[in-house]
Amino acid sequence: MAVANLHAKQDNHAERIALFALDAIKAANATLIDETEPSRGNVNIRVGFHTGPVVANVVGTKNPRCQLEQDLLAFVTHTIFP
């Protein structure tokens, strides 16, 4: 997951995240699934965009980590990856 326009206002945040997504797809497509067996092909990824408000918080006490939440992420997490 990547986020733009979160820390400081960026008038071109949609363009920046789109260019990042294209670069990520190109990098994944250039990465072999198994270097010892190139016939298995390359990594493929899908990207999506969401605009709107998000909430960040810290989760956990023994191993704290940052969590970024928004409505679409919750929807995708519970419907596509149950």
Image: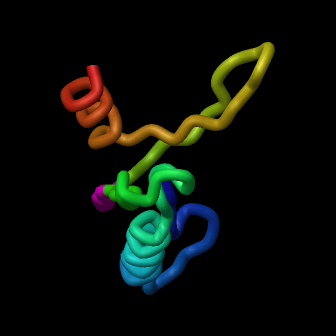
- Identity of the residue drawn at 28% across and 42% down: 72
Q: Is residue 50 visible?
A: no
Residue reaching furthest left?
A: 79
37 or 56, nearer to the observer = 37
- Identity of the residue drawn at 52% across and 41% down: 68
The image position of residue 23, as x and y in percent, is 46, 76
26 or 17, nearer to the observer = 26
In this rendering, position of residue 76 left or right of residue 36 = left
- Identity of the residue drawn at 55% across and 56% down: 35
Instruction: Please name the predominant secondary structure of the magenta segment in the image.
Output: loop
- Identity of the residue drawn at 38% across and 76% down: 22
Q: Is residue 66 above or below residue 53?
A: above
Q: Is residue 10 above or below residue 73?
A: below
Residue reaching furthest right?
A: 62
Q: Is residue 66 above or below residue 6?
A: above
Total numbered badges shown on the rendered structure: 0
Q: Is residue 74 visible?
A: yes
In the rendered image, the quadrant that contains the C terminus is: top left
Q: Quadrant of residue 57?
A: top right
The image position of residue 32, as x and y in percent, is 48, 60
Residue reaching furthest top?
A: 62
Q: Is residue 80 above or below residue 16?
A: above
Highlighted range, magenta = 46-52
Q: Is residue 72 magenta?
A: no
The image position of residue 78, as x and y in percent, is 26, 24
